[in-house]
Amino acid sequence: MTTSDKNQSGKQITRSLNMKYSLTLEGLSVGICASLAAVLYRLVLDYSEKGLNGILSAAKTNWWIALIWIAALVLMALAAGWLVKKEPMISGSGIPQVEGEMSGHLDQKWWRVMLGKFVGGVLCIFGGLSLGREGPSVQLGAMAGKGISKGLKRSPTEERFLIGCGASAGLSAAFNAPLAGIIFAIEELYKTFSVQALLSVMTASITADFISKNVFGLSPIFHFHVESMMPLQHYWLIVLLGAALGVMGAVYNKVILKSQELYGKVKWLKPQFRLLVPFLLAGILGFLMPEVLGGGHVMMDLLADGRLMIGAMLVLFLVKFLFSAVCFGSGAPGGIFFPLMVLGAYLGGAFGSAAVSWLGLDPSFVNNFIILAMAGYFTAIVRAPITGIVLVCEMSGSLNHLLSLAAVSIVAYLVAEALKSTPIYESLLERILKKQDIPRPEQADGKRSIVEIAVEVGSPLEQCEIGRALWPKNCLLVSIQRGNTEVIPKGDTVLLPGDLLVALTDRKNQTELAAELEKLCRCKEP
């Protein structure tokens, strides 16, 4: 290593050790920029949905308006398809793309993605496609964080932190859910805990929530009135519900992936024209069953009224389920986050209503099952239980049901795992990497990168001396953060659970090293 390399590495190590302070300030900047993008996106989508409802109302009484609207849907489909062709990274939810960016496998053009995702997402929601705003909001926020990183000329390590901050802020602004934004970043993106990550995403998420609530108010997203907590003698129903949600979550993941495969098998339908299918289907459903259009706010309002029968719930669920698969499978820019929670709510509503009819359950507990099913279904599909629990609590404005939410989420998680259903975002990212011929961003340029990962309880490194550990090649352990204390690594230093390892490597080896260190630091499965 030359003197220049040593100086460069020394600066990176020093900056890494003091990163929590700079990242907190930068997290504030990212939170502001990401929230402005997400809030603007949310505002435009709200106006788009209102405009869609107005057009459909007028089209039902004027056949010529209906014809003009169908023609407009064709044009919007072609425009959205053209955007996806020009920038493939705007396709779908956006969360798998952010995860790919965090892992170092993708290197998105942040300004192209922001522009394309914004316009494409608005076209899809205005057209009535069954897609959510949360995935695009996460991707918009993440790309805002990447843009700030590029402007400040930050290292790849810091850039990933800022991308995580932006993703957290995007989710927070989309749902007025700051805690869910924080947990989502830690649980789904970082997949590990560190002080730097926690402080920076907290700052970004809370900043985004403050800005969002100044625009949209303090009210929660959902307005389900839950009168009381579920009695302990009814918890067997929660276990049964969790098992059913685990099965249905596995089915959902299978159908979503299968829908992508079916589009791919239609060779004569080019990718840029695939969006014609969901747009035209949305035009038909707009006249036959407009409740299933969009993310699902109308369906949630119908469910909140408490006047739907079990049969109506199941019909709406089935149509929404299939329509969502058709929309997402086409590659349209939009998320699955909110639609899948709407589907979960309907499963919970049908389950609770059946318990009332057949088991004599008090009707006041139906809303409990709706809330529980949203968290359980989310957990079964995404496999991020803490995010699902916290998100449902914040969206419903109640923290009184944590025990029952945890119970249903655990059961749904275990059942989905037993069925060997891969988490949906992992499956989607794998397909993106397989489909897109994208080189890894870490090219051999002689630069160094910092990799940080925490030692877990039960991992191979727990209570292990550094000199006895089987470290990956091209790995130099430069520091150990133990609480607020820095430990200089030596051969006889014993690693403890919670230790944050700081390793130095060539940038080209960063992704591989992070994966190998993660195996060493993760708890062994029994």
Image: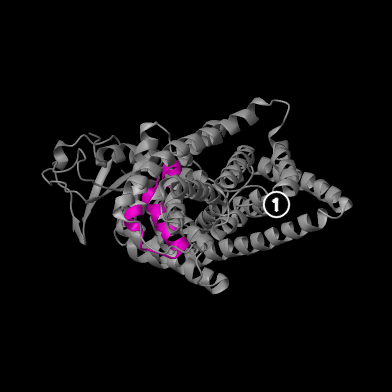
Disc 1 residue crowd, few under 14, some 14–19, many 20+, Cα 10 Å: many
Q: State which quarter of the image contains the N terminus.
A: top left
Amino acid under disc 1: Leu
- Which residue is drawn at the image coordinates 49% and 47% (left, top)? 344
**Residue 59 visible somewhere in the drawing:** yes
- 96 versus 123 height, above or below: above
Q: Where residue 407 sits in the image (x, y, percent)? A: 33, 49
Q: Where residue 333 sits in the image (x, y, percent)? A: 62, 47
Secondary structure mostly seen in magenta is helix
Q: Secondary structure at mark 1?
A: helix
- Which residue is drawn at the image coordinates 48% and 55% (left, top)? 167
Q: Where residue 129 sits in the image (x, y, percent)? A: 66, 47
Q: Nearer the viewer, residue 310 or 345?
A: 310
Is 244 within the magenta? Answer: no
Q: State which quarter of the image contains the C terminus.
A: top left
Q: Where residue 474 sits in the image (x, y, percent)? A: 30, 37
Mark count:
1
- Judge left or right: residue 32 versus residue 471: right
- Judge left or right: residue 153 versus residue 309: left
- Which residue is drawn at the image coordinates 47% and 46% (left, top)? 354
Is 382 within the magenta? Answer: yes
- Which residue is drawn at the image coordinates 51% and 35% (left, top)? 433
Q: State the extent of the magenta-drawn residues as a range.
A: 379-404
**Residue 155 visible somewhere in the drawing:** no
Tag 1 residue: 123
Q: Which residue ends up furthest to the right in the rendered image?
A: 64
- 298 versus 258 height, above or below: below
> For residue 154, which quarter of the picture?
bottom left
Q: Nearer the viewer, residue 364 or 484?
A: 364
